[in-house]
Amino acid sequence: MKKQYYLLIITLGLLTFFSACKNESGYKTLIITGQNNHEWKTSSPILKQILDETGLFSSEIAITPEKGGDMKNFDPDFSRYRLVVLDYNGDPWSDKTNKAFVEYVKNGGGVVIYHAADNSFPGWKEYNDMTGLGGWGDRNEKSGPYVYYKNDELVVDTAAGPGGTHGKRREFIVRTRIADHPVMKGLPARWLHGTDELYSLLRGPAINMQILATAFSDTAAGGGTMRDEPMLMAITYEKGRIFHTAMGHADEGGGPAMQCAGFIVTLQRGAEWAVTGDVTQPVPFDFPSAAGAVLRPDFKEISLDEAFSKLGNYDIAKSTKYFTCLKYHITKSAGDAGKLLDLEKRMVKVLTDKESTTEAKKLLLRELSWMGSDYSVNAIKELKSNPDLKDEAEYALARMQQVK
Amino acid sequence: MRDKSSRRDFVKQSAKIVAGAVILPNIIPASVLGKGGSTPPSDRIVIGAIGVGSQGMSNMRDFLELKNAVRFVAVCDVDTLHLEKAKQLADEANKSKDCRTYGDYREFLEKEKLDAVSIALPDHWHGIIYTAAANKKLHVYGEKPICRTIHDGKTIVNAVKKNNIIWQTGSWQRSQSHFHHGAELAINGRIGKIKYIEVGLPDGGKGIGTPPVKEVPAGLNWEMWLGPALKVPYRGVAHWDWRWILDYSGGQLTDWAGHHIDIANWGAGLEHTGPVEITGAGVYPIEGIFNAPVEYDFLCKYANGIEMRVANAARQPHGMGTTWYGELGWIHVDRGNRISASDQKILDEEIGENEIQLYKSDNHWQNFVDCVHSGKQAIAPVEVAYRAISVALLGEIAMTTGETIKWDPDKEEIIGNPMASRLLSRPYRQPWTLPTV
């Protein structure tokens, strides 16, 4: 097995190769995996894609020796990286590697702890200081207190008992606890996460740790603690910043936990914060709310171009997301007449396209009723002769004429 | 009840006499003032109800609980299932089978001779029917929010004023003593000069996606239910859940504006004005037919320097309810008799004779009945209701456009923003129009 002890840069086909090129200037990132009680071969490439997608990171995946293997040769040069992502739950690393990792964080290196990585290394003090909270691995009261919210109050609970459990997988509401933290700023206060394990009873040193978001572990949903359990955490360790997400259990293709736009975006934001202490990424239109979980099967945000290309086929019964995307961009263009006119021109193009559905045209007419300019008027007048669109066309014109 | 017009005139005339004479206790039976005893049938208000779904029925029950204060003689709804239940409730109270039913409010208003009407409809119908009822010179108990657009609201206010009717909005929190107490302490400076107000309204809930188009249930007149709103196929959503769809409502924000924003205005002396600047953002569902914001967060600035932040409860430090912050402390009020303050002593304060005495009512429906008799203004009059919902509607416009909205609360116009100004009204689908006042 010794031959497998190497630092591997996986190039997952051409796509990853191109994205790696594109991101050459991004923060150098190392994703460490290779041992996990979870499907790391699925999750690690997805983590890489999620991070590189932002254009901020340029990630590589390092695979450790298999379980029981010799860790001596697992010796990454952490100093080459701005961010280390742990998708690892396995054998202890060598003392040398541990020391190098601690040095890296002490000197300001960023870290992301992903899901079961908080199960790892129960005996490594510094690592547990970095994760803040952990579970399983025989963790108990000696590992540190349970930390959770109860009735909206933060509880640090030193009661004896095991660390780590989760009930039946389910969708659950994630609730923001520190709305003005850079990672959370602008996000909904509550959002429905895709079906996932709801990590509960985590315990650990919890030093220099802020709980950014929690989820209520409801007994009724099948195994729960009736506590609001920490889901997202921000920890500082000397000069280093650690972002810890307890979410994202990988199923085939990532599954709803990893495809969840809320998981993806909080990971992207948390990773940036871990590197710089700030977040520059805008909140995307598809960040979920309490209204429902939002999945990105390809882990990408829908672009405005894609939304326009699909808007003409609009079928409300299939999906409303492309229209929601357009509305988001209209709102974001507030006060910028040029941008609004660009959007209006593209909207009129869909409106005048014979192939576009009636449903699409109806919805566009409603938006144009308030944000349309003279540019749209003739196109809208044309639609008055269409019995299916007459009402909406008249609605739009009446509103537009009322205030020029 | 054979000749309603004569009793109706009696009630109106006695109202005028009482209002002029200030000898109210001698004329009005004690029971009318909610002190027990029985009311002669001739003094009972002859009332009808338009919209008798969940809230309309709830209001009917609240009126009937007053004991002999009102007599429901006619009910109107676009769903015959609602009508059956409402008629049954009225007939049981009347010990008769005479309560008449209507599927069209126009026929109801034309044929019935009433003193008053209780109205509880989806918001998109408020403009037309409130105005029409006021034009018929009926006293109105009307559900909040009183309008779906600012333009509708202005029209309703004008109609109520011009026709000189008694108006009570369903903002019943005003008739609960702890809300009254909190507002009275705030307006009398017990926390010093008010600087900031926090209003927490409910968080939005889960959507239902887009259900398939369904056959309209027997008994529901879908065309009439839609009325002035744009035509859409029936997907199983009408009663109650209309409030999650922007064509008919603004979601939790506008649904609750008539409660906690109304209380906020009451305690801060803002109930006859509006903000001058509004800015904020909403969180909207990505998928499905429920498209009202599930989260909302906007800041209103007033000419006198007060700022009011309106947001869903999960975003507010006190969660649900109204919190006034003054130079000396804060007071928070919410449902469930909840009232708290930065210092308990503030709540123990009493209001002196020479201080501002806010209107006192112990029962919202009784207050309406009393005012119909006395001609006095009710505790939740129309302009105050309009000012409460206009805060939410301006917030909605700020969130929709993404712009900071400048508002002139005297002229009731948006300043320098034609696009946003278009959102102050909505064209009605033919053949519906807002009645002229």
Image (cartoon, coloured by chain):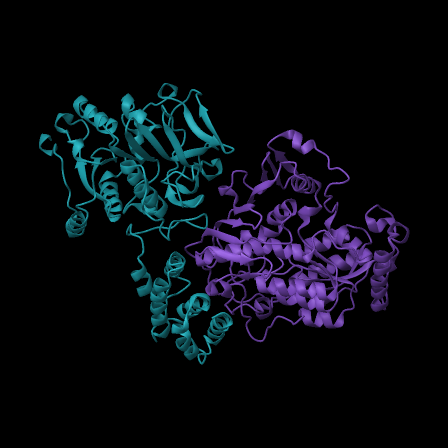
Chain colours: A cyan, B purple
Residue in front for this viewpoint, B269 or A50 = B269
Q: Taking A376 as reference, is A78 above or below it?
A: above
| Residue B282 horizontal side relative to residue A78, left or right | right
> Quick check: can you spot residue A65?
no
Going 62% across and 63% down the picture, which residue do you hit?
Answer: B154
> Quick check: can you spot residue A190?
yes
Whole-percent x, y for residue B188 in the image = 68, 40
Going 50% across and 64% down the picture, which residue do you hit?
Answer: B421
Going 38% across and 50% down the picture, which residue do you hit?
Answer: A294
Q: Taking A281 as reference, is A210 above or below it?
A: above
Q: Quadrant of the N terminus of chain A?
A: top left
Whole-percent x, y for residue B63 in the image = 75, 53
| Residue B412 horizontal side relative to residue B372, left or right | left
Where is residue A201, by image quadrant?
top left
Please tell me how many numbered marks the rendered image carries: 0
Residue in front for this viewpoint, B53 or A185 = A185
Q: Taking B197 as reference, is A386 above or below it?
A: below
Whole-percent x, y for residue B16 in the image = 84, 60
Outermost residue toward the top? A142
Whole-percent x, y for residue B352 in the image = 75, 37
Residue in front for this viewpoint, A379 or A351 = A379
